[in-house]
Amino acid sequence: MKRYNITVNGNSYDVTVEEADANGAAPAAPAAPAAKKPAAKPAQSASAQGGVKITAPMPGTIVDVKLQPGAKVTNGSVIAILEAMKMENDIVSSCDGTIATVNVTKGQSVETGTLIATINA
């Protein structure tokens, strides 16, 4: 079993996923299934690096950085634009706050999970 934190419409959930065997059958269920519950919100940080991390959802190239440290953001504000498979994808803020750090530059290649920016919520 693997555990993941998944965010849907701004709500964060801690979920457990079971792996199926080659026949598609799931292994025996545990005695007490894990219930979906909201994951804890990231701790706020007073340091230069923000408590909320924005990461690349897929590999690609940063074609534009829209905001710099100190900029105010709201949930959904575009921070950077990532080009992947000839499509431009907006990398957006997941909360209201202030940009603490921007960790990429225009033209930089990134992998899935690369830190794009941090936000002080």
Image (spheres, rainbow, N blue to C red):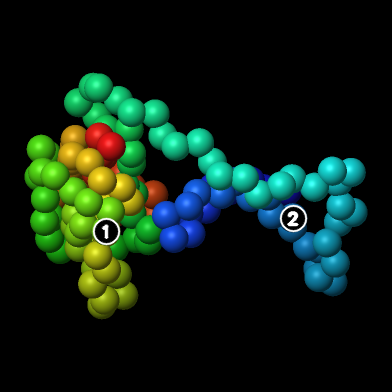
Residue at 78%, 62% in the rendered image = 20
Residue at 21%, 57% in the rendered image = 77
Left or right: 5 as drawn, with respect to 46 = right
Report crowding for label 2: few under 14, some 14 to 19, many 20 or more residues within 10 A (C-alpha).
few
> The C terminus appears in which quarter of the rendering?
top left
Corner quadrant of residue 53: top left
**Label 2 vs label 1: CA separation?**
32 Å
Q: Which residue is mark 1?
A: 76
Mark 2 vs mark 1: in front? 1
**Amino acid, disc 2:** Glu
Q: Nearer the viewer, residue 12 or 64?
A: 12
Q: Which residue is mark 2?
A: 18
Left or right: 96 as drawn, with respect to 9 = left
**Amino acid, disc 1:** Gly
Residue at 41%, 34% in the rendered image = 42
Question: Which percent across, then down, holds residue 5?
Answer: 54, 47
Res 108 label: none
Question: Which percent across, then down, holds residue 24?
Answer: 81, 70
Q: Please count the marks in the image.
A: 2
Label 2 sits on a secondary structure element that is: loop
Q: Nearer the viewer, residue 111 or 74?
A: 74
Say if residue 61 shows up in the picture. no
Left or right: 59 as drawn, with respect to 36 = left
Label 1 sits on a secondary structure element that is: loop
Image height check: is 62 above or below 95?
below
Question: Which percent across, then down, holds residue 34?
Answer: 74, 45
